[in-house]
Image (cartoon, rainbow, N blue to C red):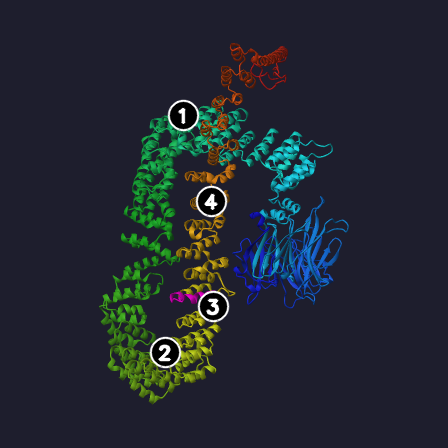
Amino acid sequence: MAAVTAAPIALREALNLQNLGVQPGTITFTNVTMESDKYICVRETGAQNQLIIIDTANPAAPEKRPIKADSAIMNPGSKVMALKAAVPGVEGDNLQIFNLDTKTKLKSMQFAEPVVFWKWVSATKLGLVTATAVYHWDIDAAAGDPVKVFDRAANLEATQIISYRVDPTEKWCVLVGIAPGAPERPQLVKGFMQLYSMEQSRSQALEAHAAAFTTLSLGGKPAAPVISFAQKTLANGQVVSKLHVIELGQPGQTSLKKSAELFFPPEFADDFPVSMQISDKYGLVYVITKLGLLFVYDLESATAVYRTRISADPIFLAAPALTSGGFTAINRRGQVLLGTVNEEAMVPFVSQQLQNLDLAMALARRGNLPGAEGLIVQQFQRLYAGGQYKEAAELAAESPQGVLRTKETIESFKRVPAQPGQTSPLLVYFGTILTKSALNPLESVELGRLVIAQNKKQLLDNWWKDGKLAASEELGDLFKGVQDWDTAQAIYQQAGSSGKVVEALAAKGDFEQLAQYTRSSGASPDYLFLLQRLMIDNPDAAVNLAKMVAKQPGPPLDLNTMADLFLQRNMVREATALLLDVLQDNDPKHAVLQTKLLEINLVTNPQVADAILANGTLTHYDRPRVAQLCEKAGLYMRALQHYTDLSDIKRVIVNTHAIEPQALVEYFGTLSAEWALECLKVLLETNMQQNLQIVVNVAKEYTEQLTAEKIIELLEAHKSYHGLYFYLGAHIAFSENPEVHYKYIEAAAKTGQLKEVERATRESNFYPPDRVKTFLMEANLPDARPLINVCDRFDMVQDLTLYLYQKNMYRYIEGYVQKVNPQKAPQVVGALLDAEADDTFINNLILSVRSLIPVESLVAEVEARNKLKMLNPFLEQLVSEGSKDPQVHNALGKIIIDTNNNPEHFLTTNPYYDSLVVGKFAEKRDPSLACVAYKRGQCDEALVECTNKNAMFKLQARYIVERSDADLWLSVLGDENKFRRQLVDQVVSTALPECKNPESVSVAVKAFMQADLQAELIELLEKIVLNNSSFSNNHNLQNLLIITAIKADKSRVKDYIHRLDNFDGPAVGEIAVGYELFEEAFEIYKKFGLKQQAIKVVLDHMEDLDRAHEFATKVDEPVVWSELANSYLEHAQVGEAIAAYLRAADTSKYNEVIAKANEAGQHDDLAKYLLMVRKKVKDPKVDTELVYAYAKNKDLGPLEEFITGSHLANLQAVGDRCFEEGLYEAARVIYARIPNYGRLASTLVRLHQFQAAVDAARKANSPRTWKEVAYACVEEGEFKLAQLCGLHIIINADDLMEVSDFYQSRGHFEELITLLESGIGLERAHMGIFTELGVLYAKYRPERLMEHLKLFSTRLNVPQLIRVCEELELWKELTFLYIAYDEYDNALMVMITHSPLAWEHVQFKDVAVKVKAAETLYKGISFYLEEHPDLLNDLLKVVESRVDHSRVVDIMRRAQQLPLVKDYLLAVQKNNLGAVNEAVNELLIEEEDYQALRDSITTYDNFDQLALAGRLEKHELMEFRRIAAFIYKRNLKWRKAVALAKTDKLYKDAMETAAQSADREIAEDLLRFFVAEGQRECFAACLYTCYDLIKPDVALEVAWTNGLMDSIMPFLIQTLKDYTGKVDTLMHERREAQEARNSEEAAAKEQEQAANAYLHLNSYLALPAPDASGAASYGGAAPGYGMAPQF
């Protein structure tokens, strides 16, 4: 009944633009565009224009973009946007197209004419309508400009264009516009349409409000374009409303032209169509009017189907919903409405409500809609009975919901004989389906059999590739039968037949895919059989299969078994490949397999075993066993790697001839140091000559582990100095061990490697030099260079010289001095002198190196031996050669001084000697000569030390004054100089009076000052300055004298001030202040006229303000008054300070004055001062502080007068200060002047002027201000004013909760609710307002909550309200919220837990089908079982697809309520579940419905059949016992079935069962039973039924012994006939076999004769005989003769 009354059109609100933040004023035809149901564009205008792009698939995340365009439309299929804007000063419109996904501009242009309407007419083409013409702009076309299509007709002048469309073939266009109504009825808007044919280039003007194109295939003809348009016109005072459907084409060639009335109710008399959409899916026309009416018409017949009102608000825009076959419309409230066909209700509505069966059937076929099954079946039967097989076939193929596409239909067509010259109905049936859709599994198999029988498999291949066939195991078998394994596999796999898939993959040899498939599907094929078969046919494929099997988790075949299968067939290579793949993971559990792998290869192919071991992937095999096999196979290196006993290693390691040397060296790295040394010892003992190189290489490689000492010891023990030399030669570069270096030198010397000895002694830094020197001296090498290297490097020249001199190796002495190291020549000379060598040899040796010899060292060596004079000729020669070497001249000077040969002349004239060296030498002989030398070289310390030592202070004083060196003065005037007094006396008395150089005097004075000799300095300066010397009027010296007196003798300062005139007064005065001589400083400043500095001394140091004021009055200068004012200010005497500043007219310190005055509160004086300041200074702070001073003095009159004039004051800052200090009246005046309405409102609140505060807040329009005023009004009880303020606050979501908490904390609940109820009507009302109002309703007015939820469910914060309702236990409302939030599980649990308040049956069903947790459903079922058992079946029917039927049965069984859900069980039995089948069978047994029980167990076999049979065989009704026998028979329990049949005397059943069992014993027992029971007829019938099972001899015996020969005679005749035929067949086969053998023997004899003939020729030709096939073979050897003779 529900299906009949349900509306055929389902309507819902897809989204609401206002809920997405779209302003209501922008929801207009001008601002909103919608080209399809995918995107909606809204252009918001205001202070900042923006474009809102709404993706209907994700409406919660609209995309907003700033935009300056006049219009924007989205492409109907992709995210491509077109923009149109008028550029100021440019004629026409600027058009741009953007791809929003790639963020690229596709096209842009400046169109010459303004575009009044535009629309996407296809996915790549825009239609542009101007005032005069229509253009198309293709975004894919190479040309960028729009192309003109046609000119606008005259009837569209002065109209508003509302629609433009192009048909799918792009051959027809229609343009629609509207205009105001006629004068007699202006409310009825006129509609005009221009239809244009592109082929004919002609237009037709019509009256219409909406139009749309589609294509239709009529009467079997190709699809043709069709236009439908709706019009509502006023003709002769009558309103005519019609819908037209017309096929477009050439006149006289069209067949469709329909029209129908559009009935408008009286209250919609002036309504008119605004949009038309055509559903190609259902063949319906949707006409939507402005006032929200929807007309639905059938397209082909123009028959009215349905009419309803879909919107109470005007609709201005609509677009097709292509996927659903419906439409999308937008009304002025922003509702986006989605209308679709209610598929369950459409056909019943048309057939029952409209009583239009033909239309109902047409709609059902066209849209594949349910509801017309009975009508379709009746029509099919009528056509079939009338012989209209073709029509019946087409009807069955196109039947909605596939109601006629059954096996019965196919069988019925098979029975129809094919008529000559006509296509059979079955092929018509299949062809119709293939043309429009795909075949189902049954149809696919039937067609496949038919096509393969006709040998047209290619057709099947094409249909399968095109997706026209449905996969099934039977279809796969058809392809398998023609050896198309690829297609068969694809079909099996798609059909889910795992066993067949495995068979196909194995047949193809695609084992990798087979492994992948078995892992994913869980199939378990017989791998053993497949493996054995492949070993014979394809060994490589067998290996691949074995690998695949091995990789499966828990391999179906044992790995060892598979390996043995290969080895049994001597397939070593294949077994190796398998095991290598299996063992690559190196699992310890595969140790035996690893050993087996290595064993078989070490025995058969050692190279393979060696490669496996080299790979290193196997580590768990039997290493001792493998080691032995490696040794036997000659793989000695591998054997060494596996042996662990030293004796085995020693035995194998001597086979160095068969071991790669580098590998052996690397092997030693695996041994311990002790074992390695033992093995090296064995190698040296076995064959030193052969193994020495290996031993040395090992020693080199592993020196660190074996230690150099042990290796050296080993080699020395075997007297292998060559080995020692080679080893140490490689090791010495990395060793710093002296012993190693020594041994290397020793080994090189003993092996005659003298060059290496020389190199080592020259380059090595680590050998012990003493031992090496001793060894080399003892070795008496013919070449002394190694010894020279050692002695030279380690400074053993003395020993070297003595050794060479004693060995008469003078040539090496000369070579060492001349070529090796001339710098060591002095030591050689010293050694030769010690050895008492001939002086001539020594002098010649010295002269041979001449300038290369270090003279200083040579002089020291010779001087130490008192033979300095012997160098005089050598030195003279060097000087004569122009030597300027100081050492040469030093030596020469020493000789001159020592011989007293006019030394003063040498000391004063020679510029090259070192004064310090020569002076030291002369000091011992004559100090005056030493001073001459020191003075010449400015050797200050040496000279001072010499003069102090010899009491030569006058000479010292004169030298120091003349020297004028500050550092020298510092050293001699220091406290540590015990001769300072003597020096000072000589300086004061002699040196300085004699000095005429001012610089020298200045340096001396500075030195005295630096040495802090104040008394001595004063004495010195008075002598210089006051005694009329040449320095008396010296500025610096006068300064110095006064300053020194200030520091050392203050009593003399005033006297010096009055006596001296040429000193620096300011500087000296400052110093005097520093030493607290304030009176002296004051006198100095007055003497030099420094009045400002003078008063500063009085103020800052004397701190006498009265004396300062007296001095300022006397002087009366501004700077003096300023200093005095500053001091007053520092002492917080603000009034006096301001007076002084006014006297000085000083504005420099106005910031400090302002600060001090504010601290002291002397704003009266401050105002006077600031008035003076602002005359000179233009600073905002001055004016600001002046305003503040007026405010503090409460001089509101001057304040207002000042701020109204020209000023720079920061009124905001002053106002804030006044506000903070409570000067609200002044603050009011200032804020009003600024103006600052926010702060003005705050001030007025403090003054309790609330109405004025609200007015100010309105002007400020600031959330903070609104809140402040609102809260103050609430506190004062001014709720109306508070509400007025609150409406401006709550529109900001962030402030809403603050307002709510404020009201609630003060108990004003009703006022808060009133405020929020007013707020939800605001344009900017947001989700928070609706949500908070809901919370308040829940807390204080729960009776109003549900209505609020239903009205505004889409505008609420549902999670927040859910929490509130849970806390307040509002269960019905909580259920509603859970449903709205798609939390269906929670909604269901609330209805279960709180059923008295929350449960509703319809709602419970709607929620149950949407829950996610299955456990929740079962709780719901249990709830219905307990509280609403009468509705349980209804609930189960709804959730049938969501529940586990077995668990439902278990619930019902435990509750003992299975009969209650019988309807449900029968409905779900189609799933063939064991629990359901057993429950149904149990109910049928209880009801004794044996026929239903037989149908159940026959159709659904998933239950415990033997248990059921055991129960039924004891049933009192025979039919149930018969069913038990039937079950036993199905389960191969033949004896039980036969026994039951015999018990119930159902002999026919017993005989059929025995025959089906194929068990000879059962048949013979049954035969004897019939004889025993005297059932002769049954005896004869049993012989016939069980003919194949009963032996003739048994039958004859039973019949003869019981007198039943007549009954057995037919059986015997048939048996004799069968046996005779078998004997004849055997004889025929025997004869054929004998003939075949005879033919083979004859052929063999002929072949033997031919071979003998060739053997006879061999003795002459010496050529081999041909093989048995007769082909000659010339490349091989003749049997028994070895190689063939060579010619």
Q: Which residues are magenta?
A: 1302-1318
Determine the image quadrant of residue 1422: top left
Q: Judge whether 1092 appears above or below 789 on screen.
A: below
Residue that label 2 marks: 1155
SS type, badge 4: helix
For the residues labelled 4 and 1, say whether their Cβ atoms are less than 8 Å apart: no
Q: Disc 4 or disc 1, which is closer to the eye?
A: 4
Kind of residue sitting beneath label 1:
Glu
Disc 1 crowd rating (10 Å Cα; few below 14, some 14-19, many 20+) is: some
Badge 2 or badge 1: first in the primary sequence: 1
Q: CA distance from mark 2 to mark 3?
A: 45 Å
Kind of residue sitting beneath label 2:
Ala
Q: Disc 2 or disc 1, which is closer to the eye?
A: 2
Q: CA distance from mark 4 to mark 1?
A: 89 Å
Residue that label 1 marks: 631
Residue that label 4 marks: 1430
Of residues 65 and 369, the one nearer the viewer is 369
Residue sticking out furthest to the bottom: 1114
Q: Position of residue 884 (x, y in %)?
A: 38, 59
Looking at the image, which residue is at 41% across and 40% down?
1455
Badge 2 or badge 4: first in the primary sequence: 2
Q: CA distance from mark 2 to mark 4?
A: 92 Å
Quarter of the picture containing the C terminus is top right
Q: CA distance from mark 1 to mark 3?
A: 101 Å
Disc 2 crowd rating (10 Å Cα; few below 14, some 14-19, many 20+) is: few
Determine the image quadrant of residue 1311: bottom left
Disc 3 crowd rating (10 Å Cα; few below 14, some 14-19, many 20+) is: many
Does residue 783 show up magenta in the picture?
Answer: no
